[in-house]
Amino acid sequence: MDHSDVAGDIANILLTEEQIGAKLDEMAAQIDKDYEGKDLLLVGVLKGAVMVMADLSRRLHTKAEMDWMAVSSYGSGTKSSGVVRILKDLDTDLTGRNVLIVEDIIDSGLTLSWLVANLRSRGPESVEIAAALRKPDAAKVEVDVKYVGFDIPTEFVVGYGLDFAEKYRNLPFVATLAPHVYS
Ligand SMILES: O=P(O)(O)OC[C@H]1O[C@H](OP(=O)(O)OP(=O)(O)O)[C@H](O)[C@@H]1O
Ligand code: HPA
Ligand SMILES: [Mg+2]
């Protein structure tokens, strides 16, 4: 079998580009309502959140700044190590700011619970979370998410920013991988 093309690596498409786009429309409308008249700082969590940050931010009418943090807890594997490392910190002082963390996925919740606590300690006015995906049955810690796109089953997924060993981030949809990819 020829596994050189991406299509041969995909087992099942969970969410199409159209479904994701429609959900982001709803999320952006709610965020616009909630932040009306406020200054908003979007904090994207590299690298996975690049797609959702680009697509969500372009749907907002609220004036927003964007900054980025790079943290990593998964390395090249499919399981969270539980140890969060800051690879790149924010450039922005959070004092008095309304921060909205933009994430691709909440899986164990370890990354975001750590990140929320870290950002709250910097004196912001508020810290909320917008996440495209959440795996409710995989939660090891509860994370209070204000805006969530889709709840998905406890399966490793790729696409729309999500990687397996740095690949598949550029897929426009969210999918599971064929077993041969892991072997
Ligand atoms: O809820 P958790 O179990 O903590 O998992 C979620 C986190 O894991 C992934 O990041 P990863 O560490 O793979 O970095 P990446 O975004 O660069 O792929 C994902 O983008 C989230 O940040
Ligand atoms: O299901 C996932 N896929 C890719 N990266 C991830 N990081 C946490 N969960 C996942
Ligand atoms: Mg990753």
Image: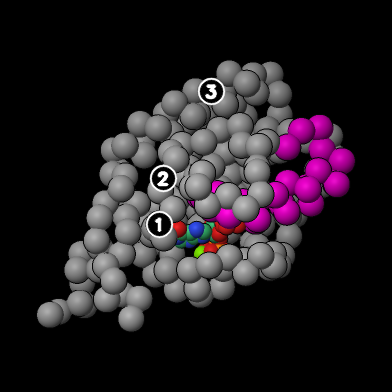
Q: Identify the residue under disc 2.
A: 152
Disc 3 marks a residue whose amino acid type is: Gln
Q: Identify the residue under disc 1.
A: 155
Q: Quadrant of residue 22?
A: top left
- The image's mark for residue 81 is none
Give me the C-alpha separation between circle 3 and circle 2. Answer: 21 Å
Left or right: where does residue 102 sit relative to residue 162?
A: right
Where disc 3 sits, the SS reads helix
**Residue 48 location (% of width, % of height):** 51, 57
Left or right: where does residue 143 sit relative to residue 49?
A: right
Q: Nearer the viewer, residue 140 or 38?
A: 140
Number of marks in picture: 3
Q: Are marks 1 and 3 in contact (CB under 8 Å)?
A: no
Disc 1 marks a residue whose amino acid type is: Glu
Q: Quadrant of ligand 1?
A: bottom right
Disc 1 C-beta below 8 A from ligand 2:
yes
Q: Badge 3: few (under 14), some or many (20 or more) residues near its Cα, within 10 Å?
A: few
- Vertical placement of residue 12 versus 120, above or below: below
**Residue 87 location (% of width, % of height):** 68, 68
Give me the C-alpha separation between circle 1 and circle 3. Answer: 28 Å
**Residue 159 location (% of width, % of height):** 37, 57
**Residue 101 location (% of width, % of height):** 64, 43
Report the residue that reaches farthest toward the left.
1
On the rendered image, what quadrant is the C terminus found in? bottom left
Residue occupying the point 56% across, 73% down? 75
Magenta residues, start to end: 104-127
- The image's mark for residue 30 is 3
Where disc 2 sits, the SS reads loop
**Residue 24 included in the magenta stretch of the image:** no
Q: Quadrant of residue 36?
A: top right
User: Closer to us: mark 1 or mark 3?
Assistant: 1
Q: Does the rendering let one see residue 134?
A: yes
